[in-house]
Amino acid sequence: MDDAVKPRAPVQPMRMIRDAHTGVDRDPTYAEAVTYARALPNGATSDDFTGLHKCRGGDACSGCFRPLCAVCPICAYNCPCGAGCTDVIWCLWGIPIPLFSCVTACACREGDESGAFIARDKQQMKSCALVPLDPNSGRYAVYFAEGCEGCDRVFREDARPACVAEPLFGASNAIQI
């Protein structure tokens, strides 16, 4: 299969969802996000994650990451490695932090057609999934895999994102080399 991906026309972004029970806006669940990603023309590509992003705490763990991410200057810079992989470089005030980048250094599209890019740990177990929410701007959500060590880790369909990566300088803010 050819790694070259044709540019797609702008698509409607996935926005916050109003919870029918509480009436409060929430981030999409893993199932909602991958359904959106599967429906994208050409599916999810590494270009959907490209550029510098500020991490905003998601709804996982009852939103406990939100206050930390609000004051934390941690960002992620994503560089595409072909159409099927993206390299995630963690930054502090825009300066790369190689130590943290070893945790989720690369996320790749897998053959399961989930629409997510999966990062794996040193034992090749799933650690997190990057799912595009707005390919036009580069906004995406990060979901943690669940399961015990040595077991197959899975993404629960009702999982909420641990963080939502918001582009800092608009769409496609990647530095072209």
Image (cartoon, rainbow, N blue to C red):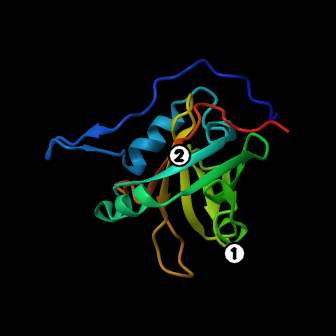
Q: Position of residue 7 (x, y in %)?
A: 70, 22
Q: Position of residue 67 (x, y in %)?
A: 35, 61
Residue, far bottom: 149
Which amino acid lies under the numbered mark 2 shown in the image of this protein? Val
Q: Is residue 110 visible?
A: no
In this rendering, the count of numbered labels is 2
Residue, far right: 177
Which amino acid lies under the numbered mark 1 shown in the image of this protein? Lys
Quadrant of the rendered image containing residue 47: top right
The answer to whether residue 52 is left or right of residue 155 is right
Q: Position of residue 107 (x, y in %)?
A: 66, 55
Residue 14: mark: none
Identify which residue, 121 or 43, lies in the foreground. 121
Mark 2 or mark 1: name the one nearer the start of the chain.
Answer: 1
Q: Residue at x 37, y 49 (%)?
A: 29
Identify which residue, 75 or 134, lies in the foreground. 75
Q: Which residue is mark 2?
A: 131
Q: Residue at x 40, y 55 (%)?
A: 70
Quadrant of the rendered image containing residue 159: bottom left
The answer to whether residue 140 is left or right of residue 162 is right
Q: Find the distance from the CA under tag 2 to the CA under tag 1.
A: 21 Å
The answer to whether residue 120 is left or right of residue 149 is right
Secondary structure at badge 1 equals loop
Q: Which residue is mark 1?
A: 122
Secondary structure at badge 2 equals strand
Q: Quick one: quadrant of the C terminus?
A: top right
Identify which residue, 175 or 157, lies in the foreground. 175
